[in-house]
């Protein structure tokens, strides 16, 4: 009797776990991780309770422990919550499909129809491989060739760089007195980010191939100032710079002058102002006015904000307003009053309709916080491993999240040998290549990553909004937004990294069930998104045997059975959690990433607080999306990653946010993504070292 009791006990344990996986609304959850090791642990505990009573026990016990001997040594017995239990219901999206504002990107006109230098036309056709003009180029180039100021608004990816670059080069090469390098800058181009500065420099350099006496140059944060000063002394005729670094040289470099500057071009003007560079732009305008009173000024942006209008009033002289989408918007009926109400109390400047690329497909997926990590991983696997020739950009809200998810995906998804099952090796998994880009990286590394992703045909780039503006990254097929942008304008800029210059592309916005009203906000601005089901995304895990749950009795897979999809998602989640909890350092890293996510979540503007409120988040569920098994305690008191010295307890982040100077500091953190290299973090480190240096002599 005793001999038969043990197998029944073991079977009862395994059956309970099996029922837990099969019926999401059935028995009470068994708080154990539904991974292969769980079945072994359950059997082991049953064996302990029936110790010495059954001769049949050792066989299954030995069989299970042989397969999991290594994991047994490294993994303690840990209780985990069920991945598919206690999640909020996913609401139905009730909103009418809206007619989007779309621009016809290309026209039938060619550059040869313009009064341009033959060598310049030849360069455009042969070097840049462009034959016909885009709509914004057709309207902008003739105006700028006439010497007029212009305020240009057009969708992202419509060719605005060439719209000002071609008339600029045409104007400078045709000057009566031939330009000398020692003359200094004849044109100044301001851009918000270092990557956009490099990209604009590359485009201008190509246009200048026939005109070698005109020298372009770039100034940006992260580069050595001595080398930049040397270049300025030799002479730069077309100066491309980020605002902060240029202001630094204006104040500290004597050879900087603007006596001959005839052009001022401010690209992505709204972003430059939104990130707090308004004072820097004012300093630059004052320096330009001191050197030369008259010049031709061009402001370019994909969106028209109040700040851009204010800057236009200050810097432009009787400008021509160019907006390709205006005629299309006049033909469309305004959004319904209900849609306007659902978008919240936005100011009139934000209530405009945005133009989107014609071949861009937009999707939204509702994902509970607990399932966000496995859903994102499944989507990456589907598009970049099982489908060919996909190039993806994934946006996060902080640098810490980019670093954390980059390391997590490289270790778990990229197909390390320790994750491959014997006899089920998957060479294609090694094709997954991950890159990261954010404002806390060294400039050399940022440039290297930017160039690598620029040249690659496939890959996944994890980034912050540092890559959201103006960058022309060819062949990007998918844009994924893991955190919703703070405005529809920012949404447009992010998705504009794909479907550029008439190419096709797709975007995916990941929202929590509590954030469903954001879809109505987008609809109020004539941005139409289609829903993609989370269950459909998770089915891609059926194609990867690394996440197969190995059952007792060698039962075969049941096709695309929803239950098996859930099992594989649970196995994948357990792999993420195993890596995160493999050391104290990775746990601390995950907590810092979670902390940065929560901090960024509190920065949504007031008119979006009814959609994005910190109180609507379940901390334990959000922690799951960072591979943490429990909601961490004392997030505000976490030590810095890699810090060894004990420091005095700092005030809690919540307290800092209540104070005005805390909010200013938060704004500086966000601004650092686009800084000139004069990062506040460097200054803070120096301040911390001073007391130590002063104490050593005494």
Image (cartoon, grey):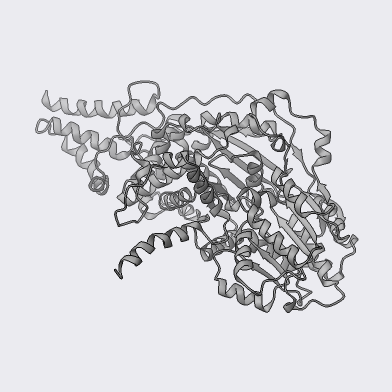
Q: Quadrant of the C terminus?
A: bottom left
Where in the figure is residue 454, as x and y percent of width and height?
61, 60
Splitting the image into 4 quarters, where does residue 283 fall?
Answer: bottom right
Q: Is residue 486 left or right of residue 300?
A: left
Splitting the image into 4 quarters, where does residue 532 fall?
Answer: top right
- Please state the total of marks drawn on the protein image: 0
Q: Quadrant of the N terminus?
A: top left
Where in the figure is residue 435, as x and y percent of width and height?
51, 56
Q: Is residue 11 left or right of residue 199?
A: left
User: Taking the image as drawn, is residue 218 in sight?
Assistant: yes
The residue under the point 74% across, 28% down is 335
Outermost residue, top side: 26
Where in the figure is residue 485, as x and y percent of width and height?
59, 41
Outermost residue, left side: 52
Compared to residue 482, the image places residue 690 above or below, namely: below
Where in the figure is residue 94, as x and y percent of width and height?
63, 24
The residue under the point 73% across, 78% down is 181
Q: Nearer the viewer, residue 72 or 427?
A: 72
User: Taking the image as drawn, is residue 56 in sight?
Assistant: no
Q: Nearer the viewer, residue 171 or 83?
A: 171
Q: Is residue 307 left or right of residue 57?
A: right
């Amino acid at each position: 009797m005793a001999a038969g009791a043990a197998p029944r006990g073991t079977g009862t344990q395994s059956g309970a776990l099996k029922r837990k996986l099969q019926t999401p609304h059935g028995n009470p959850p068994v708080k154990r991780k539904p991974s292969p090791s769980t079945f072994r642990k359950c059997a082991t505990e049953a064996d302990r309770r029936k110790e010495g009573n059954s001769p049949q026990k050792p066989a299954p016990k030995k069989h299970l422990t042989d397969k999991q001997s290594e994991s047994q040594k490294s993994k303690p017995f840990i209780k985990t919550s069920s991945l598919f239990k206690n999640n909020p219901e996913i609401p139905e999206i009730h909103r009418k499909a809206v007619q989007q504002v779309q621009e016809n990107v290309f026209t039938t006109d060619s550059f040869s129809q313009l009064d341009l230098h033959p060598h310049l036309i030849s360069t455009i056709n042969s070097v840049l491989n462009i034959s016909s003009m885009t709509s914004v180029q057709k309207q902008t180039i003739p105006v700028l060739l006439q010497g007029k100021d212009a305020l240009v608004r057009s969708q992202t990816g419509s060719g605005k760089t060439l719209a000002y670059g071609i008339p600029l080069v045409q104007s400078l090469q045709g000057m009566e007195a031939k330009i000398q390098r020692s003359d200094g800058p004849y044109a100044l181009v301001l851009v918000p980010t270092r990557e956009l500065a490099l990209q604009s420099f590359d485009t201008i350099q190509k246009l200048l191939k026939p005109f070698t006496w005109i020298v372009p140059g770039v100034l940006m944060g992260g580069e050595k100032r001595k080398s930049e000063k040397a270049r300025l002394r030799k002479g730069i005729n077309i100066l491309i710079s980020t605002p902060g670094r240029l202001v630094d040289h204006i104040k500290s470099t004597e050879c900087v002058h603007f006596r001959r500057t005839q052009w001022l071009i401010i690209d992505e003007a709204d972003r430059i102002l939104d990130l707090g560079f308004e004072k820097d732009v004012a300093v630059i305008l004052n320096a330009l006015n001191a050197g030369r009173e008259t010049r031709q000024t061009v402001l370019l942006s994909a969106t028209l904000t109040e700040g851009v209008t204010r800057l236009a009033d200050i810097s432009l002289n009787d400008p021509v307003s160019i907006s390709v989408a205006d005629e299309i918007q006049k033909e469309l009926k305004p959004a319904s009053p209900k849609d306007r109400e659902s978008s919240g109390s936005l100011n009139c400047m934000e209530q405009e309709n945005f133009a989107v690329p014609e071949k861009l497909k937009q999707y939204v997926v509702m994902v509970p916080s607990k399932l966000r990590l496995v859903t994102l991983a499944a989507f990456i696997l589907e598009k970049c491993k099982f489908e060919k020739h996909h190039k993806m950009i994934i946006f996060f809200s902080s640098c810490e999240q980019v670093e954390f998810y980059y390391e997590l995906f490289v270790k778990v998804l990229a197909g390390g040998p320790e994750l491959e099952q014997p006899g089920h090796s998957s060479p294609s998994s090694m094709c997954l290549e991950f890159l990261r880009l954010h404002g806390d990286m060294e400039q050399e590394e940022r440039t290297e990553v930017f160039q690598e992703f620029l040249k690659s045909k496939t890959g996944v780039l994890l980034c912050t909004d540092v890559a959201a503006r103006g960058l022309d990254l060819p062949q990007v097929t998918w844009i994924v937004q893991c955190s919703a942008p703070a405005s529809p304008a920012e949404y447009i800029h992010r998705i504009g990294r794909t479907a550029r210059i008439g190419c096709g592309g797709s975007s995916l916005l990941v929202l929590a069930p509590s954030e469903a009203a954001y879809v109505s906000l987008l609809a109020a601005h004539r941005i139409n998104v289609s829903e993609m089901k989370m269950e459909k995304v998770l089915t891609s895990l059926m194609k990867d045997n690394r996440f197969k749950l190995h059952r007792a009795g060698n039962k075969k897979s049941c096709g695309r059975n929803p239950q098996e999809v859930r099992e594989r998602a649970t196995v994948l989640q357990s792999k993420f959690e195993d890596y995160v909890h493999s050391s104290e350092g990775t746990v601390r890293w995950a907590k810092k990433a979670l902390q940065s996510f929560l901090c960024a979540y509190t920065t949504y503007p007031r008119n979006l607080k009814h959609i994005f409120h910190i109180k609507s988040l379940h901390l334990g569920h959000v922690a799951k999306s960072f591979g943490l098994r429990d909601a961490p305690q004392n997030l505000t008191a976490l030590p810095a990653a890699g810090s060894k010295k004990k420091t005095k307890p700092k005030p809690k982040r919540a307290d800092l946010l209540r104070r005005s100077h805390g909010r200013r500091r938060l704004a500086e953190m966000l601004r650092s993504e686009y800084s000139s290299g004069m990062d506040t973090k460097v200054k803070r480190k120096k301040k911390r070292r001073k007391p130590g240096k002063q104490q050593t002599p005494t």
